[in-house]
Image (spheres, grey):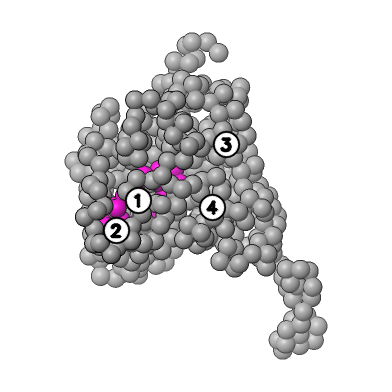
Amino acid sequence: MSSSDCEQSVVSVDLEEPPGSSSTTLTLPLFSLSLDSPPDGPIHSLAPREVVAPRRPRVISRSRDFRRRYFPQATEGDWNDWRWQSRNRIRKLEQLDRMLILSDDEREALVKGESMLPVGITPYYMSLLDREDPMQPLRRTVVPVTGEFVRTPGEADDPLGEDGHSPTPGLVHRYPDRVLLLALDFCSTYCRYCTRSRVVGHGEIMPNEQRLEKAFEYIRQTPQIRDVLISGGDPLALAEDKLDWILGNLRKIPHLEFIRIGTKMPAVLPQRITPQFCRMLKKYSPIWMSVHFLHPDECTPEATIACNRLADSGVPLGSQTVLLKGVNDDVEVMKSLNHKLLMMRVRPYYIYQCDPISGSSHFRTSVSKGLEIIEGLRGHTTGYAVPTYVIDAPGGGGKIPLQPNYIVGRDGDDLLLRTYEGQVYRYPDPA
């Protein structure tokens, strides 16, 4: 690899910046990431009887050693400040080259970068990656490989047809009573299998007031909408006052009953879940949250504290996991993940078949593998640890649940059912 190739790769990876950061040239009248404001105050001002998690997450030795090696000037206070984490994301080839022993495949993908989804990894999440093993599950999900340049039949940049169901920019109305509100296109850490890689990280969905007001107005004028999912990008990348403004406007709409937030922050930047943030959410209760966890290695002490804070604030948590080849396509891995999530007070909600996004074939498993995992969970662990396996139908058809076939057939007025142990039982069910 020549030095000119290295320079080119740095430019291609370094294009994306969080809205409002000190180095960006974008000007937003209302919304920005509040990366430079002071950290939250101590929690000892809370009511004496209130049970709260420690102010600062306990730093596991692996994270502490990583910080001392690669960020020697950073204090523990810096490390536990989500704004510091966002400002210091790993985004350039030379950073990755220093922290990881890159494989030839990873290096080639970084050099060729072009218009791919930008690279962005928080220092916290980077500390969870294996320096030597490019096949480590977490590393595979955030470090690009050349498989992203391969296009196979059936793949599309917008496989779910979101753009065709968008009545106003950043709003998707696919189901009769619910809409998807894209608050922004920025994430603190970018997943290489992202369904919205066509727009995420490229500055196409900015969190400005004018665009969001148009979305609010559409919802006001459409009374059948009772449910809004705020996603992106990651809406938790917004500062409290900005997300407060969005939630406040939605809560003023009389026919809107259900507000949800989709985020991966508890897994990739758990420091974001501060007591101040949780107090803001509590004003708009009930707020439901879908959190994105992929692998048991993400269920760290820091992530546990983040989820406990949310649960203590009255926020019901459900996990959404994408089934990925070589990452979690194994019954025991998925069982371990779901058990750990339950202990973190997160209900396993969905396992998604990986969407046929352009360049995702190296991540996609067969549907039979997903059914095998569900069959390996059902009856072999608590029902709370068995999520629903779904395919989000290409072209905008919505989520379609899939289950192993437990109906063997009929015998007269009896329905023949197969148990998780393979035994057949009769259930009276006159035709």
**Residue in front for this viewpoint, 237 or 307:** 307
**Amino acid of disc 1:** Pro
Residue name at image x 67 percent, y 50 percent: 330
Q: Secondary structure at mark 4?
A: strand
Q: Where in the figure is residue 166, as x and y percent of width and height? A: 38, 53
Mark 3 lies on residue: 140
Alpha carbons under labels 2 and 1: distance apart: 19 Å
Q: Where in the figure is residue 413, as x and y percent of width and height? A: 76, 88
Q: Where in the figure is residue 128, as x and y percent of width and height? A: 51, 37
Q: Is residue 417 left or right of residue 262?
A: right
Residue name at image x 35 percent, y 64 percent: 314
Alpha carbons under labels 3 and 1: distance apart: 32 Å
**Local crowd at mark 3 within 10 Å, few (<14), some, or many (≥20)?**
many
**Amino acid of disc 2:** Leu
Mark 4 lies on residue: 321
Residue name at image x 80 percent, y 86 percent: 412
Callouts 3 and 1 close, C-beta under 8 Å: no
**Residue in front for this viewpoint, 381 or 363:** 381
Q: Secondary structure at mark 2?
A: helix
Mark 1 lies on residue: 54
Q: Secondary structure at mark 3?
A: helix
Dominant secondary structure, magenta: helix
Q: Quadrant of residue 75?
A: top left
Alpha carbons under labels 3 and 2: distance apart: 33 Å
Span colored in magenta: 261-281
Position above or below: 10 against 163: above
| Discs 3/1, front | 1
